[in-house]
Amino acid sequence: MPIKVENLVHIYSKDTVFQHVALDDVSFTIEDGEFIGLIGHTGSGKSTLIQHLNGLLKPTSGKIYIDDVDINSKDVELKFIRQKVGLVFQYPEHQLFEETVYKDVAFGPTNLKLSDGEIKDRVKNSLELVGLNYEEIKDKSPFDLSGGQKRRVAIAGVLAMRPKILILDEPTAGLDPRGRDEILNEIKSLHKKEKITIILVSHRMEDIARLVDRILVLNKGKIQFFDTPSRIFKEAETLESIGLGIPQVSDLIRQLRKRGFPIEDCISVEEAKNAIINVLRGKKNA
Amino acid sequence: MLKDITIGQYIPGDTPIHNLDPRIKIIITFAFIAALFFINKFFGYLFVVAFMIMAVGLSKIPVRYIFKGLKPLLVIILLTVALNIFMTEGEVIYTIWKLRITKEGLIQAAFMALRLIFLITGASLLTLTTSPISLTDGIEKLLNPLRSIGVPAHELAMMMTIALRFIPTLLEETDKIMKAQMARGADFETGNIISRARAMVPLLVPLFISAFRRADELALAMEARCYRGGENRTRMKQLSIEFRDYMALIITIVFFLAILWSRYFVK
């Protein structure tokens, strides 16, 4: 299910004093099963862009194709698009409303008018996908859970729609480092297990660098880069100039190389550790 | 869809109208509204038109915005016009079925419509050119003399400030939760009244929870900064009446006298 965006423009409050161009001629293609990181400074248009992908916002001009279907043409039912493209908003726990976790996660499938058995299956499956124990949690009130658990339940609520494309807007915002790592690892394993396309929105390079296949960098409503992490990190100066920067470990490697250390680019701490050890050992042997 | 609400919207600017003292602006607006009710012949509206053109021109607010405020009240205006046309006794000029249109009715209807239109546009000019904060500041200062008879001026103004401050926040929140539930297949737009009311539950529950959470946080933040109400509280920005405020008052008084003249002395 490829995503194709062509010359997308979005202008807020057009023709008023508050007019603001949020997206300016954005075009890109995302293939099936890709894991994409969407990154950009506050106000770069990330949230605006993802809301276009499931038809919550309409483009001022330009086209969006999901699976070769123009989602803004008149004969397309947005309900189906929204089922295919799952969108997890920032602080998704703020959307919880039901008395029990079960009912809340079941909200999406119920709207799809599925059978009770199917709904139960999906709820159980989704809760397990986000690392929660179904039997333990299903009858609890979502408001009695911890912050990290609430967020998982909310993500499960979107997963229960069985989307082919999952978009997560800053899923780690406001979590402690451990909660952040847990959520990111669950997203990673979700991508592996379910083979769905994932778009992860973040403003922290650290979070997404080691997870994603490609990174889309937005700057002031335009695409600055759309490439693999290691190639994007070569553009460290440009990234810094638009307020992003590269992960600390990549920066360290760059500094080392500048001082004559024969070392390749790395994007994770683990990789860097091994590379440095190898270089040091090689030196000793020589 | 929720961003279309323009009543009470403030458009920042640096014009003589924007810079008037909010107390003076409130007083002028009330004088303007009172004057509208003194008018008893069309001739009187000439002064109103002149006054409005001057005020709007000075404020540099696009005329479009002034009239936008009328949209939500269109129904009320039309209803007033219809009632006046058909219910006024007098010289009949046209009859549809049992409804009689009278000459007096038409005049009365035009009269009322003009009064309503000017009333609304005048009031919206006040909110368009005055930030909510300075508006409540002005109201607080104007109510201050009434404190001796037990009107809690500061508390009222603070409540208004907070309420106004949170309107955009709550609208944004509503928009966000609505979208989040729509992404889970919620449908707010179709169905009969009952199913639509039920569809609101997934929106209202999170909205209430977040409103209470925000209220809690705000109360805590205010207490942490030692807020204890209005007693002996000083301000960073003191309001002061300047030359332009006196000018505006004089113009308003002249305008008011002209209206009175048109009512009592012009045949």
Image: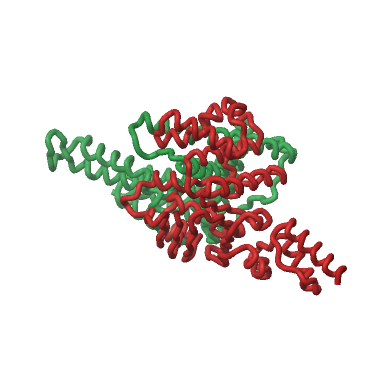
Chain colours: A red, B green
* Residue A169 % position (x, y): 57, 49
The answer, for residue B223, to whether it is visible in the render is yes
Q: Is residue A269 left or right of residue B86?
A: right
- Name above or below for residue A268 compared with residue A99: below
**Residue A44 lies in quadrant:** bottom right
Residue at the image point whose x is 53% and y is 59% from the top: B13
* Residue A238 % position (x, y): 64, 70
**Depth order, front residue of B166/B57:** B166
The answer, for residue B249, to whether it is visible in the render is no
**Depth order, front residue of B169/A241:** A241
**Depth order, front residue of A92/B219:** A92
Residue at the image point whose x is 68% and y is 70% from the top: A237
**Residue A285 lies in quadrant:** bottom right
**Depth order, front residue of B261/A199:** A199
- Name above or below for residue B177 compared with residue B247: above
Q: Is residue B172 left or right of residue A270?
A: left
Q: Is residue B30 left or right of residue A145?
A: left
- Name above or below for residue B55 compared with residue B141: below
* Residue A236 % position (x, y): 68, 68
Residue at the image point whose x is 67% and y is 43% from the top: A182
**Residue A67 lies in quadrant:** bottom left
